Image (cartoon, helix red, strand yellow):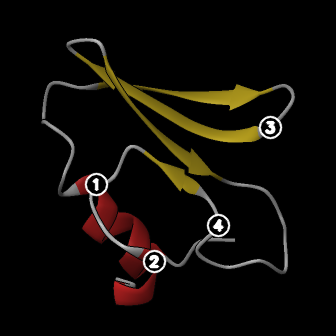
């Protein structure tokens, strides 16, 4: 699960021209790509919070 306010803050780090696609396979989420850089936001139901991003610049103890 991800809160909308958290998703908004994460997307501020993504360029406006990035390509975004939904992905369902071994995981479920949003895959973002721009100039060979990738970001990932997990979007599946889970009790775990803040264990769902790859490629974003923030430390887990300084949660958004």
Mark nearer the N terminus (1 vs 4): 1
Q: Residues within 10 Å of mark 3 (few under 14, many from 20)?
A: few
Q: Nearer the viewer, mark 1 or mark 4?
A: 4
Decide: is 49 above or below 33.
Answer: below
Q: CA distance from mark 4 to mark 2?
A: 9 Å
Please tell me which residue is depicted at 27% across the width and 58% down the height of the picture.
Answer: 57
Q: CA distance from mark 2 to mark 3?
A: 21 Å
Q: Are marks 2 and 3 in contact (CB under 8 Å)?
A: no
Q: Observer-nearest residue: 11 or 58?
A: 58
Q: Element under label 4?
A: loop
Please tell me which residue is depicted at 52% across the width and 54% down the height of the picture.
Answer: 53
- Residue labelled with disc 3: 27
Q: Quadrant of the C terminus?
A: bottom left
Q: Observer-nearest residue: 4 or 9?
A: 9
Please tell me which residue is depicted at 58% across the width and 74% down the height of the picture.
Answer: 50
Mark nearer the N terminus (1 vs 2): 1
Decide: is 35 above or below 9.
Answer: above
> What's the mark number on residue 32?
none
Q: Element under label 1?
A: helix
Residue 36 in picture, x, y percent from top left: 29, 12
For the image shown, how many numbered marks are present on the structure? 4
- Residue labelled with disc 4: 51
Mark nearer the N terminus (4 vs 2): 4
Q: Quadrant of the N terminus?
A: bottom right
- Residue labelled with disc 2: 60
Q: Is residue 10 left or right of residue 49?
A: left
- Residue labelled with disc 1: 11
Q: Are marks 1 and 2 in contact (CB under 8 Å)?
A: no
Q: Observer-nearest residue: 29 or 64?
A: 64
């Amino acid at each position: 699960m991800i809160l909308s306010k958290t998703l908004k803050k994460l997307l501020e780090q993504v360029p406006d021209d990035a390509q975004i696609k939904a992905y369902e396979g071994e995981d479920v989420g949003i895959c973002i790509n721009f100039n060979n850089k990738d970001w990932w936001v997990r979007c599946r139901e889970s009790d775990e919070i803040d264990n769902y991003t790859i490629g974003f610049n923030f430390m887990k103890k300084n949660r958004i």
